[in-house]
Amino acid sequence: MNGIDLTDFFKGIVDSEEGPIVICNLDYRIVYVNPKADVYYEPVKPLAGKLLATLMDEEMMSKVVMSVEWFKEDVKNNKVFALHDKVNNMDMYILAIRNSKNELIGFYGRREDRNPEDGKEFDLD
C-alpha cells in the first residue's frame, strides 16, 4: 500500500476494539493482547508469551484445540462461538487468522458486547 507499513494500521484496529482480544500462534502461545485484554485478564497478566494451556483448564483448552483443528479442515471454517460471559453480557468467539494464501497462521479470541441498545448511532458528543 504505497510503501506504508500496515502493521501500525492493524495494531491500531486491534487496540481500538472495545473488548479484549487475545492473539495466538498455532503453538497456542499468546503473541499479542490488546489493552482491553490486559484489563479484562488483569489477574493473570502479562499474557503475551504464555501458553494457553497454562491459563485454561483442560476442558476449555480441549475446546480451543478442537476449534483450531476445525479451522484447518476448510478455509471457510473461520469463526466458532465459544461461550457467553453472563457477568459482562458478552459472547466469546474464536476466529481464524489466515495469510494471503488462506493458510491458517494463528487464531484469536474476541468478545462481542450483547448490549446493542446501549449504543447510539453516530453519538459524537
Image (cartoon, rainbow, N blue to C red):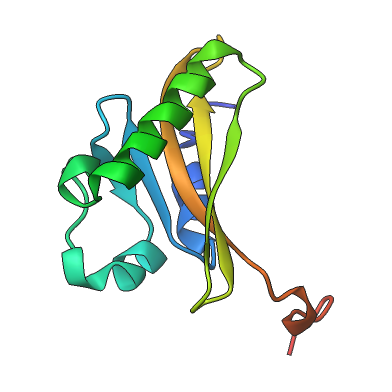
Residue 5: percent from left, percent from top: 46, 33
**Where 117 falls versus 18 (above or below)?**
below
Residue at 36% x, 30% y is 65
Residue 125 vs 61, above or below: the answer is below
- In front of the other: 8 or 61: 61
x, y percentage for residue 68? 43, 26
Q: Is residue 79 above or below residue 2?
A: below
Answer with left or right where residue 120 lies relative to residue 69. Answer: right
Q: Residue at x 73, y 83 (%)?
A: 118
Find residue 124 and report its horizontal and vertical position in percent: 75, 83
Q: Residue at x 75, y 79 (%)?
A: 119
Q: Please, which residue is most extreme toward the top here?
A: 101
Q: Is residue 83 left or right of residue 36?
A: right
Percent across and percent down for residue 9 are 52, 45
Classify the position of the N terminus by image quarter. top right
Quarter occupied by residue 18: bottom right
User: Which residue lies at the image location 49% right of the left edge and 79% below the top edge?
Assistant: 87
* Residue 102 visible here: no
Query: Would you say residue 37 is visible in this rendering?
Result: yes
**Along the line of sight, the residue nearer the viewer: 39 or 115:** 115
Which quadrant holds residue 117?
bottom right
